[in-house]
Amino acid sequence: MDIAGTGKKQTETRCLETPHQSPTPPRVTDEKRVYFIRCGEFVKIGFSVRPEERLAVIQSVMPHEVVLIGHIPGARRRERELHTRFAHLHHRGEWFRLEPELRKAISNLIRGKGGSKKYGGPSKRFLEKIRALARAREAEAASLTNGI
């Protein structure tokens, strides 16, 4: 496709890296997470303390639907380990080709079968914080409805 008569060709780009947004709402938890976001035949291996919010930011600038496959405990070090492990599938930025090898590894990591127990599935601390937050919200909702 010719760009405004310049003679330069425009190529279709899909599933590109997005800039980080700020400011963001308060954190539900401070536990660092390595997330896996899928867009078509690619997956983004990234790091965030709020993977669901990161998904919303990425979706807002993507022309195609993106899906949060899952996330595991871990920080930038774990993210870099995975980037190195799957360097042969690297596409651009933090995006990797979602080949069967990577698909299986992600599935195993999310289900807690990733080798090291340290990085498999949500930690007890993370689950406790989520449950405490849910209880607090339920209590607040109950107190609001009791006054009606």
Image: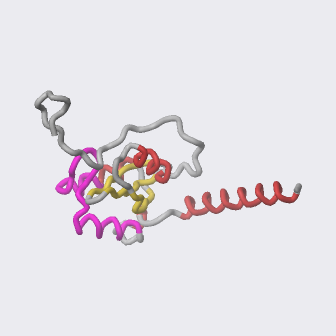
Magenta span has 64?
Answer: no
The number of numbered discs placed on residues in the rendered structure image is 0
Seen as rendered, the residue at the extreme top is: 6
* Residue 103 drawn in magenta: yes
**Is 38 in front, or is 45?**
38
Question: Left or right: where does residue 66 sit relative to residue 133?
Answer: left
Residue farthest toward the left in the current orientation of the protein? 7
Image height check: is 56 above or below 72? above
Write the residue at 60% across / 43% down: 26
Q: Considering the image in quadrants, where does the C terminus appear?
A: bottom right
Query: Residue drawn at (55%, 64%), measured in percent from left and top?
Result: 124
Say whether residue 98 is left or right of residue 28: left
For residue 127, above or below residue 78? below
Nearer-the-camera pick, 126 or 118: 126
Q: Residue furthest right?
A: 147
Horizontal and vertical percent for residue 63? 34, 48
The residue at the point 23 percent across, 57 percent down is 97
| Magenta region, residue range | 82-110
Q: Position of residue 141 (x, y in %)?
A: 76, 57
Colour basis: secondary structure
Task: Report which quarter residue 72 is drawn in.
Answer: bottom left
**Helix, strand or loop: magenta stretch:** helix
In x, y percent, where is residue 107?
Answer: 35, 69
Would you identify the image quadrant in which residue 9 lies? Answer: top left
Residue 127 pos. (x, y %): 57, 63
Is 112 placed above or below 42 here? Answer: below
Left or right side of 137 for 74: left
